[in-house]
Image (cartoon, rainbow, N blue to C red):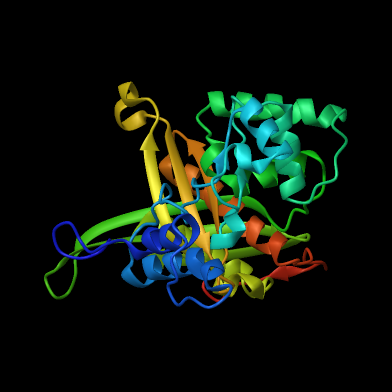
Amino acid sequence: GLGERCGNANMISLIPNLVLKMGFETGLKDGALQRLTHLSRLLDDRLNVGTNRSAAYVGTRAFAHKGGLHVSAVEKDPRTYEHVDPEIVGNQRIIVVSDQAGRSNIMARFRQIGLEVDAKDPGVARLLEIVKERESEGYAYDGADASFELLARHELHTVPDYFALQSFRVLAERRVNARGQLIALSEATVKLEIAGRRAMEVGEGNGPVNALDAALRKALIPVYPELADMRLVDFKVRILDSAGGTAATTRVMIESADAKGRRWSTIGVSPNIVDASYNALYDAITYKLFRDGAAPATGPGTVRSTTAPA
């Protein structure tokens, strides 16, 4: 729960326990429980706190399944590993794909995202090997479903390339401003190719990732207005090999959301934290466009920026 010290009783878990487990009459209208997960995440947004992935009923891990045998059993009868139907509380079943995953996990995940693939398709085994190889490099798809879906769709050629990065440059500055205040600012320049057209934009932010995100938005929103309601709601960085010190490989996890209430997580890995962040941002943007049914931009020419240097 929320509040001082230990907080108040957590009604998000208490109410479904009373209704679903104990049969109490709580005055809830029919179908009200189906809005429970949405309500929980809406409250997190309003309070500006991170979502508890392990929360009972409403957490993203509440109905997650990972082991191959585990997933196979759930596919046959969800009651073997789920105490309630996740849809009753507005949540959803998640089939986790990782280096421990088997073919059953891959196929179950395909069905969830609407991909019709023959289990004997060589692409399935190839994708499983790619996942294992990339996880050995530091990727973790069990927490980045959107990145896995894009990886699978790229491998099966079912997602378009909306744009391509030619280059980006990020500058960080720390100085005393005219008011005598110590400030830190960042500036990012991105050069993109969108359907054969070149776009260059400059963005500023309070950090390098914020500046990079701003520059990407300035370049892409005029072409893809669907991105206007997309926002970053969580940003996590993990050092994968602490022995490397400041040169260690980093893993960046980004959680994004839009006005439709959808949330998705993406991942990037690189020895350079800004590069890892770009990889996660690229997946987040691509996933948003794909899920909105955006068509890839077409047409020759050059997109010129009002902020681009001469």
Nearest to the observer: residue 20 or residue 263: 20
Q: Is 40 or 11 nearer to us in this picture?
A: 11
Q: Position of residue 68 (x, y in %)?
A: 65, 27
Q: Is residue 266 above or below residue 228?
A: above
Q: Quadrant of the C terminus?
A: bottom right
Using the rendered view, name the quadrant where residue 188 is placed: bottom left
Q: Position of residue 15 (x, y in %)?
A: 41, 64
Residue under the image location 68 percent in, 46 percent down = 149
Which residue appears at 72% of the width and 60% of the height? 290
Q: Is residue 188 visible?
A: no
**In the depicted structure, whether residue 43 falls above or below residue 124:** below
Nearer-the-camera pick, 154 or 128: 128
Q: Is residue 4 left or right of residue 22?
A: left
**Quarter residue 129 falls in:** top right
- Judged left or right of residue 94, residue 72 is right
The percent coordinates of residue 11 (x first, y second) are 35, 65
Q: Residue furthest left?
A: 180
Which of 272 and 310 lies nearest the eye of the viewer?
272
Which percent across, then down, holds residue 107?
76, 36
| Total residue callouts | 0
Q: Residue at x 58, y 61 (%)?
A: 88
**On the picture, is 9 further left or further right than 305?**
left
For this view, does 97 lie left or right of residue 155? Answer: left
Note whether residue 83 is visible. yes
* Relative vertical location of residue 282 with respect to residue 119 in this rendering, above or below: below
Q: Quadrant of the N terminus?
A: bottom left
